[in-house]
Image (cartoon, helix red, strand yellow):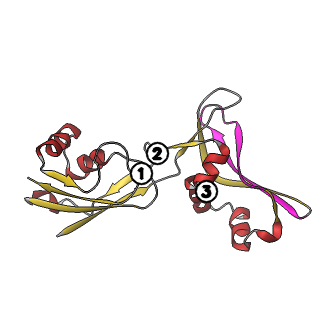
């Protein structure tokens, strides 16, 4: 029987970017936007606060874009300070590259295994799905979901008792499956 695990975000990740005021490198996004229109052109920024000093920084979302080319539902979400939109934009590689930022997901996600009744079986087939593109080490997910140490999971991989179609070392942010034989 296939078990389904889900890696879910619990809050917005920290934004890694250098603060011009205090040289800290962590900012909190709270889902607030600033929208500025100049005649037919519009600018929009996602506001982030420095975790150390509270200084506000702006992450460019739209820059000098004709108002008619912006979808009305996007404008409504910007004006409503939609936290879901902030999460989507932080995940967008174009926004991250334009603003030269990275994301820190430590403590901003959780693993939902659907219970621990599957842990006593001899063979466990698991499908891991990511609700957001959260980079996590598969070994860490498997250790957390099965109640094992990471060293124990590494040992199971080398012994061939833990198999997957993907490489289990390094970080991963896409769906995968694995089989654990005890």
Q: Nearer the viewer, mark 3 or mark 1?
A: 3
**Residue identifier under label 1:** 109
Examine the rendered structure and indicate whether residue 16 appears above or below residue 38: above
**Residue identifier under label 3:** 89
Residue drawn at x 61%, y 61% as measured from the top left:
85
Provide residue 84's location: percent of width, then percent of height: 58, 62
Q: For mark 3, give the secondary structure.
A: helix
Question: Magenta stretch: dominant SS?
Answer: strand
Q: For mark 2, give the secondary structure.
A: loop
**Residue identifier under label 2:** 105
Residue lying farthest right?
39
Quote the CA–CA distance across marks 3 and 2.
15 Å
Q: Which residues are magenta?
A: 40-63
34 on left or right of 125: right
**Location of the N terminus (image quadrant):** bottom left
Quote the CA–CA distance across marks 1 and 2.
7 Å
Instruction: Indicate the quadrant where residue 24 lies.
Output: top right
Provide residue 89's location: percent of width, then percent of height: 61, 56
Residue drawn at x 69%, y 68% as measured from the top left:
74
Q: Residues within 10 Å of mark 3 (few under 14, many from 20)?
A: some
């Amino acid at each position: 029987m296939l078990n389904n695990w889900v890696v879910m975000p619990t809050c917005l990740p920290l934004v890694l970017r250098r603060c011009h005021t205090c040289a800290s490198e962590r900012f909190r996004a709270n889902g607030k936007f600033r929208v500025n229109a100049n005649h037919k052109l519009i600018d929009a920024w996602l506001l982030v606060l420095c975790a150390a000093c509270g200084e506000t920084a702006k992450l460019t979302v739209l820059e000098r874009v004709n108002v008619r080319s912006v979808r009305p539902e996007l404008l409504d979400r910007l004006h409503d300070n939609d936290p879901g939109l902030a999460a989507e934009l932080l995940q967008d590689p174009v926004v991250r590259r334009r603003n030269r930022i990275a994301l820190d997901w430590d403590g901003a996600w959780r693993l939902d295994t659907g219970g621990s009744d599957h842990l006593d079986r001899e063979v466990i087939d698991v499908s891991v799905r990511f609700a957001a593109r959260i980079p996590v080490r598969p070994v860490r997910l498997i250790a957390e979901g099965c109640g094992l140490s990471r060293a124990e999971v590494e040992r199971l991989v080398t012994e061939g008792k833990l198999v997957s179609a993907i490489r289990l070392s390094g970080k991963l942010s896409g769906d995968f499956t694995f089989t654990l034989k005890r």
